[in-house]
Amino acid sequence: MIYVLYDKPKKLEDMSFLTSEFKKKYEEIYPEWRCVSIKQMLSVSSAVVKRAKAGDTIVCWYDFMGVLCWWLGKLTNKKIRIVAINILLKDKNTLKNRLAKFLYKRTLCSRSFDATITTEEYGRYINKVLNTKAEFTLLHDVYHKNYALDKSVEVKTNTVFCGGRNGRDWKLLFEVAKKLPDVTFNCVMPNALKEQLSDAIGNNVCVKTDIPERVFMELLCQSQLIVMPLDTEAPAGLTVYFQAAANNKMIITSDTVTTKGYLSNGRGSLCKSTVEDWIDKIQYYLKHKSEADICAKKFKKFLENECSEENYAKKLWGMLAE
């Protein structure tokens, strides 16, 4: 039996595409609530591990729940296989992160644990951080067909967009904005973060907080470019990249081990962590719209060919069938 464990209720996100290629008996498990705390994740993971029998497989959509399932299986001496989709471990010098590294390292060294990575570069990075030799399966994040906005929106000149929650380097973005007073920076972030960074927000930065998804998408589509500095090598902002590509927007973002796998080879523009590099690239692509459009077209084609729901499901089943 294959159990497929998600981290949120089905009414919030129907993930049935994931199992469309499965050739063996399986059961999808959606929790009653969105799993945002360790307590909630432990509760759901523990229930699935208790149900599993020797020889069963648990596929976890959220990677840390996969790590928890492996530890729970080990502590209860259950001979089960765990598959964690899209490892998302960061490298920080905090007690919480050091504990996470310990849990992940032991897990990744186990023969009963398999994991996917969104780019090969990030897999090498994880092995370096943890001093492991884990073998990962490359599985790019999935590009959904419904990312495109279903109405036409007028694009405003000299505008860029940055939005989301985790991994954004807002301080760097606001420093860049101060150097580009003629460019409007449309930003979407949690309200608590806006209050924390209020002193750094310039007059040409338009910040909206906790807005509906449709308003988020309309603001994205009104902007010429997507500009997203990151503060992590781990996967971050990929959903926004995919939304941008679906709506034919070019992306300028940080040069990381993750973004290289998606936006290299002319599919976007990758920046170093210097204000000057960001200023140069933003100014260039705002002025050279045709080149920006070529980058956006290349990235969209890459996603349609490599990251479709169909390809994702086939690669996941191929991994499980090995």
Image: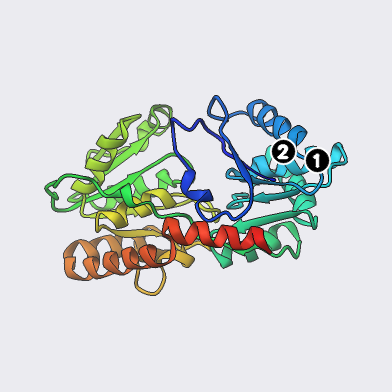
Question: Could you tell me the amino acid type at mark 2?
Answer: Leu
Residue in front for this viewpoint, 21 or 277 = 21
Looking at the image, residue 212 sits to the left or right of residue 16; the answer is: left
Neighbour tally class for label 1: few under 14, some 14-19, many 20 plus, Cα within 10 Å: many
Looking at the picture, does residue 50 appear above or below residue 288? Answer: above
Neighbour tally class for label 2: few under 14, some 14-19, many 20 plus, Cα within 10 Å: few
Which part of the image, by quadrant, shows the C terminus?
Answer: bottom right
Horizontal and vertical percent for residue 179?
27, 52
Secondary structure at badge 1 equals: helix
Residue appearing at x 27%, y 36% in the figure: 214
- Residue 133 image-quadrant placement: bottom right
Residue in front for this viewpoint, 101 or 286 = 101
Q: Which residue is mark 1?
A: 73
Horizontal and vertical percent for residue 257?
53, 63
Looking at the image, residue 158 sits to the left or right of residue 97; the answer is: left
- Residue 224 image-quadrant placement: bottom left
Whether residue 87 appears in this view of the structure is yes
Horizontal and vertical percent for residue 96?
69, 37
Secondary structure at badge 2 equals: helix
Residue appearing at x 48%, y 44% in the figure: 16
Looking at the picture, does residue 162 appear above or below residue 294? Answer: above
Looking at the picture, does residue 29 appear above or below residue 229? Answer: above
Residue appearing at x 66%, y 61% in the figure: 321
